[in-house]
Image (spheres, grey):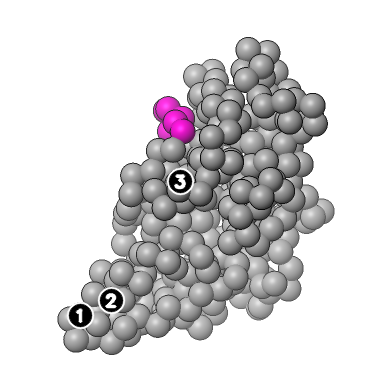
């Protein structure tokens, strides 16, 4: 798989899904204690297992990706590690294709789906979500080669397959182009977000559309080769997916809220530079559309 792993690799190609640069092991900076009253809300399955089996798709920097040693790290990981500490559980991360996470939750293969999943009304028909972050959409372009996200007709735009950018946002913009008698957007979907980023860095596409923290991180790591194309828009919550009707959603929600209230959530968002998307209240099924 082709990935972004720092400026030098981006400019010369891609060969691995690890990252040598970055924030390091941020989890060590936040020491979290178990809260018995919250842990008591866990379903018996997780209490007896002593762990949460978490399906995750990597790489999706800075939220979830592999460090140089192959360990899955990132903002999402640090926050989930803190939440599982509150619950007195161990977090067991299992790699998965993004589109297979929700079906695996429904099948009981994973306890939780954690992969920067936008909480949408459509997805809430399949699973429940505990919200933990707010992200919008932001486009990026090659430096000095402006692209207007509202008028990208005929442009080549990279997205990660099955994300809201691929299924909803860019197709809607393309349909508007066609309705206006203009060329459709050439939507180029990649299995991994990092492949989409590299396609832009290498000039294989004109722009990319991704979640705002991902675009911001890609620009930071891009060595000046790419820049934002317009402001953040269409903000919506990220959520951790659990089976419909599972009390696990409430246990996760209370754990996140505990971390928000005691300031440890803020420390984690600050560590990863994603504080612009921090929330003040975690809810169950907070989709806005």
Give 141 or 189, whichever is nearer the viewer. 189
Whether the magenta-drawn stretch holds residue 9 is answered as: no
Q: Which residue is mark 2?
A: 175
Picture quarter with the N terminus = bottom right
Q: Which residue is mark 1?
A: 179
User: Tags 1 and 2 in contact by the CB under 8 Å rule?
Assistant: yes
Q: Which residue is mark 3?
A: 124
Residue 258's place in the image compared with 92, above or below, is above
Label 3 neighbourhood size at 10 Å, few (<14), some (14-19), many (20+)? some
Q: CA distance from mark 2 to mark 3?
A: 26 Å
Dot 3 lies on which element? Answer: helix
Q: CA distance from mark 3 to mark 1?
A: 31 Å
Q: Residue at image x 69%, y 58%?
A: 96
Dot 2 lies on which element? Answer: helix
x then y, percent, for residue 286: 40, 38
User: Tags 2 and 3 in contact by the CB under 8 Å rule?
Assistant: no
The quadrant where residue 248 appears:
top right
Label 1 neighbourhood size at 10 Å, few (<14), some (14-19), many (20+)? few
Name the side, left or right, on which 8 lies relative to 177: right
Q: Is residue 274 visible?
A: no
Q: Residue at image x 72%, y 55%?
A: 95
The quadrant where residue 138 appears:
bottom left
Chief secondary structure of the magenta portion: loop
Whether the magenta-drawn stretch holds residue 278 is answered as: yes
x then y, percent, for residue 258: 55, 20
Identify the residue at the far top of this view: 37
Please tell me which of labels 2 and 3 falls first in the chain.
Answer: 3
| Magenta-highlighted residues | 275-284
Give 147 or 103, whichever is nearer the viewer. 103
Residue 209's place in the image compared with 186, above or below, is above
Label 2 neighbourhood size at 10 Å, few (<14), some (14-19), many (20+)? some
Q: Is residue 253 visible?
A: yes
């Amino acid at each position: 798989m082709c990935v972004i792993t720092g400026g030098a690799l981006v400019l010369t190609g891609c060969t691995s899904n690890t990252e040598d640069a970055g924030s390091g092991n941020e989890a060590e900076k936040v020491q979290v204690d178990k809260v018995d009253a919250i842990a008591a809300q866990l379903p018996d399955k997780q209490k007896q297992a002593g762990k949460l089996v978490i399906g995750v798709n990597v790489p999706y920097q800075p939220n979830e990706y592999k460090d140089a040693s192959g360990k899955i790290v990132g903002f999402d990981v640090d926050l989930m590690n803190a939440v599982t500490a509150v619950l007195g559980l161990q977090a067991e991360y299992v790699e998965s294709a993004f589109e297979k996470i929700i079906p695996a939750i429904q099948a009981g293969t994973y306890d939780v789906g954690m992969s920067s999943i936008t909480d949408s009304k459509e997805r809430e028909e399949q699973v429940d979500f505990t919200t933990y972050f707010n992200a919008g959409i932001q486009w990026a372009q090659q430096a000095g080669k402006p692209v207007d996200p509202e008028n990208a007709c005929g442009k080549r735009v990279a997205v990660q397959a099955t994300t809201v950018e691929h299924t909803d946002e860019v197709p809607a913009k393309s349909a508007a182009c066609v309705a206006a008698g203009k060329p459709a957007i050439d939507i180029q979907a990649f299995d991994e977000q990092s492949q989409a980023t590299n396609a832009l860095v290498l000039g294989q596409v004109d722009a990319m559309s991704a979640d705002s923290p991902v675009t911001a991180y890609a620009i930071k790591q891009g060595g000046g080769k790419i820049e934002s194309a317009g402001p953040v828009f269409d903000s919506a919550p990220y959520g951790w997916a659990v089976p419909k009707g599972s009390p696990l959603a409430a246990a996760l929600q209370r754990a996140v809220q505990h971390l928000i209230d005691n300031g440890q959530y803020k420390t984690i968002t600050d560590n990863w530079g994603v504080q612009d998307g921090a929330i003040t209240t975690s809810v169950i099924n907070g989709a806005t559309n």
